[in-house]
Image: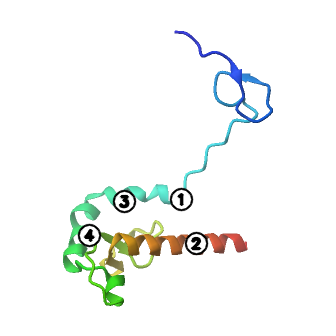
Amino acid sequence: MAMKPLRPCRYPGCPALTREGYCAKHKPKRAERRASAEYHGWYSLDIWTQDLRPTQLLREPWCQECARRGIRTRATVVDHVTPHQGNWLRFVDRGNLQSLCKHCHDRKTALEQAEKRRERAQF
């Protein structure tokens, strides 16, 4: 099998020749997996896909956030009121679930993530 030709490193100003994009010195480090990656697979378990999510959407078919503003919008996302952050009991707690439209869910998630970033920046 033929080998790739040597090319200059992609790092600006580096003259090293490599068969990959970057030389060993400038090769970007792989990003660490987020903690949420450990429990993200829970959303594909039968308890979520066959029980918790569909039951919640049947029980509350309208977005709770929109309803607070007097708007009637069909809910498409089941949200954890208090983020479970890997806590199984909080993940399966039906009392911790609410139905939201995608727009409201995305806004709520963005606010939670911004709050987390602010907390980390303080330390």
Mark 4–mark 2 Cα distance, whole angstroms, equals 27 Å
Q: Position of residue 97 (x, y in %)?
A: 33, 77
The answer to whether residue 90 shows anywhere in this view is: no
- Dot 3 corresponds to which residue? 42
Q: CA distance from mark 1 to mark 2?
A: 16 Å
Say which of marks 4 and 2 sits in front: 2
Residue 69 vs residue 120: left or right? left
Classify residue 84 as left or right of residue 59. Answer: right
Q: Which residue is mark 4?
A: 52
The reply to whether the C-beta atoms of the residues labelled 2 and 3 are less than 8 Å apart is no
Residue 35, disc: 1
Give SS at disc 3: helix
Disc marking residue 114: 2
Amino acid tagged 4: Leu
Query: x%, y% of residue 100?
Result: 33, 76
Dividing the picture into quadrants, the one containing residue 41 is bottom left
Check contact, mark 3 vs mark 4: CB within 8 A: no
Q: Tell me which label, 4 or 2, sits earlier in the chain.
A: 4
Residue type marked 1: Ala
